Image (cartoon, helix red, strand yellow):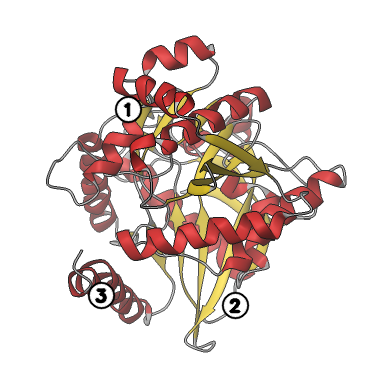
Amino acid sequence: MFDVAVQKIDFSINGNSGSFLQTPFWGQFKSRHGWNLIRARASLGAALSLPGSTGQSQNASQAQEAGRAVAHGFTILVRSFARGLFSLAYVPLFPSARFFAAADDDSSQGQEGAGVPSPDVFSALLSELAQAIKPLLPQNTICVRFDPQVEFCNPQDRDLFNQNVARASKSAAVCVKKNAVDIQPPDTTQVDLTKSEEEILAAMKNKWRYNIKLAQKKGVQIEKTSGKALNLSDFVDIFYDLYKLTSERDGIAMHAKAYYKDLLELSAQNGGAGGDVPQVNLYIAKHEGDNLGAIMTLFSKDEAVYLYGCSSNTKRNLMPNFLLQWTAMKDAKAYGSSYYDMYGMPPTDDPGHPMHGLYLFKTGFGGRNVHRVGSYDVPLKAAYSLCVAAEKARAFWHKKVLKKIRGR
């Protein structure tokens, strides 16, 4: 169907554009925390007609003349589970919108500048790409899991697309399965940082602007640090104590303390060595000696991302979280990021959703809502079904049962 070729490439070269999940820096970081890193290049030559499609076949030379022959570097993360019994390969935020667009002349626009492929092309390309990746993987790899960069303006169109992909996969006998457990948050909101600070503030809800000014008026102070700080351990201790409190209160998962410290240090080390890598910062909101909240952010040339956040139960009436976000947005704008990604929220404004408050908080900053298709698997082994069933059971236990047991 598609002339797809995948080969390993040098992953030591730093990069600071595109999704942070696909930067060599992030791959290097994850390789220090249980994942094996493979940097590869996917070459897409000709796109051939699919069953039921209206596109015309093209050979490789015609595709190249049309500008459709493309090559993309990307990250593959591999992790073993069950004491090495099986492995899973994970490809975050790839294939990219441009990669899909090169394969599908009929791609539509689900989001400004982001081509949405037809469901036939989507499923067939994922399947073929997984098969091209397979020789690079351990023999016990049960599946290749993708988080494709396919975005929609509303969740209804996204959900319809996913339904059509399921039908297309069955009709074409292509084994591509939507995973019930998404790895990256499929729903988010992004604040445009190319506007002036006045325009960004004007796009926020009135109450959000008021809360920012209130925090400033009441004397909330924001302290910022990076991996270069001599007292980094003290900042990370504060952050982690707040995160543990938030985890216990809201039932969210968290990493070990060393994970967050290493992220800050690796960014500073690589950047200090002259590398062009994303900048990771830690912000802490304080008032009269009390630590009220903290966020960790990542700035790159294309995007700024709100990675982690936590808050205390003290002085919440001072609205420290609003000032934290506004401070980070201003810094991201000064850094040169195009937008600030709140990175995760419920798909709709549903008062019945347990995270409805998070939706209101993040969308109140006036961003553009984005709805990605979520995680898709291409099974490689028969054991895939058993492993996915166990994964679903684990997710149900943590998200439903434990929360009820703990009274949330």
* Most distant residue in the right direction: 273
Q: Is residue 294 above or below residue 300?
A: below
Measuring from the top left, give residue 38's x and y in whole percent.
Answer: 67, 62
On residue 364, the disc is 1
Q: Is residue 341 left or right of residue 21?
A: left
Q: Is residue 309 left or right of residue 137?
A: left
Q: Is residue 325 above or below residue 367?
A: below
Between 289 and 85, the residue placed more toward the observer is 289
Between 205 and 278, the residue placed more toward the observer is 205
Residue receiving disc 2: 138
Residue at 80% across / 52% down in the picture?
Answer: 269
Tell me which amino acid carries mark 2. Answer: Pro
**For marks 3 and 1 on the same chain, the one whose residue lies earlier in the sequence:** 1
Q: Determine crowd level at label 3: few under 14, some 14-19, many 20+ residues with C-alpha closer than 10 A.
A: few
Residue receiving disc 3: 397
Q: Would you identify the image quadrant in which residue 284 lies? A: top right
Tell me which amino acid carries mark 1. Answer: Gly
Q: Would you identify the image quadrant in which residue 215 lies? A: top left
Q: Is residue 260 left or right of residue 401?
A: right
Numbered disc in front, either 3 or 1? 1
